Amino acid sequence: MVSTTTELSIVFATIAAGVIFTGQTLQTGEFYKPSSMITSSREDSMAPFRRSPCPAVNTLANHGYLPRDGKNISKVMIREAMAEVFNLDPAFADTLLTSVPVDVFDLNLLGKHGLVEHDVSLVHPDSYYGWDPMTVDGNLAKNLLSQAPYVYGVEELGEFRRERYVYCITTTPNCTFGERESFLAFGESALLLDVLGGNRNSTITKPHLASFMVDERIPSDFVKSPVPVAFDQVIATSKKVAAIAMAPTS
């Protein structure tokens, strides 16, 4: 008798075979986002395509700057791709990856709760609800994209982080948002503004925000930062976001 696991592997392989072939024919920079039916960021996933809870990393894989299947990816690959596409300082990229315990991994490793994935995400549901960590919650995305008319800065992202935090601690059982989670959350907001926003006064436009956070796609008119984005700059921006998000209520 063929086990359920074996049957599932055969189904995945059959579905993915043509898709993987198509992906291999694409040039670096061309966009292809595999269907959620054959993609996962669950830590124990057997899906043929792996992704993470990080939109920037997923975007790099969707454009072929990282292996499109999201497997056997090294820290060096991520560092080089971040530098090439976003002009992130390589030393800073290394710092971002220090919490990852191995040098080569599949992207779904980052979906492990407490490693990189955390509660109070901008567009991903809190861990308690059991969604695949890569999944974008349509309601969260809609709320985020209604936060400002066009340009987002530290104030808009800080206010939205505050809303997410309040919702989590008042509604989500086992909500976890301690020192580590808050450092990651506010740092991600700063990366969104300073790196994915192209390093333009810590802002990002709504179309670019939607493209990166929801579609995980590099906007056609994206221009990377003219200078390498370094650790000190992003930390300074993250502190500004945190000051708004965690300010005492009156």
Image: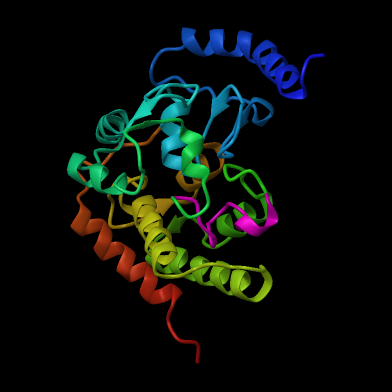
Q: Is residue 36 magenta?
A: no
Residue 223 figure quarter: top left
Q: How far from the left and from the top, in percent, is residue 205?
A: 43, 50
Residue 30, relative to residue 103: is it above or below?
Answer: above
Q: Report the front residue among 204 and 73.
A: 73
Residue 4 figure quarter: top right
Determine if residue 219 is in view. Answer: no
Disc count in the image?
Answer: 0
Determine if residue 129 is in view. Answer: yes
- Majority secondary structure of the magenta segment? loop
| Residue occupying image coordinates x 44% and y 51% | 115
| Residue occupying image coordinates x 54% and y 70% | 165
Q: How far from the left and from the top, in percent, is residue 141?
A: 60, 52
Q: Quadrant of the N terminus?
A: top right
Q: How far from the left and from the top, in percent, is residue 107?
A: 46, 34
Q: How far from the left and from the top, in percent, is residue 130?
A: 68, 51
The part of the chain drawn in magenta is 116-130
Q: Is residue 124 magenta?
A: yes
Residue 214, relative to residue 125: is it above or below?
Answer: above
| Residue occupying image coordinates x 31% and y 52% | 194
Q: Report the front residue among 49 and 84.
A: 49
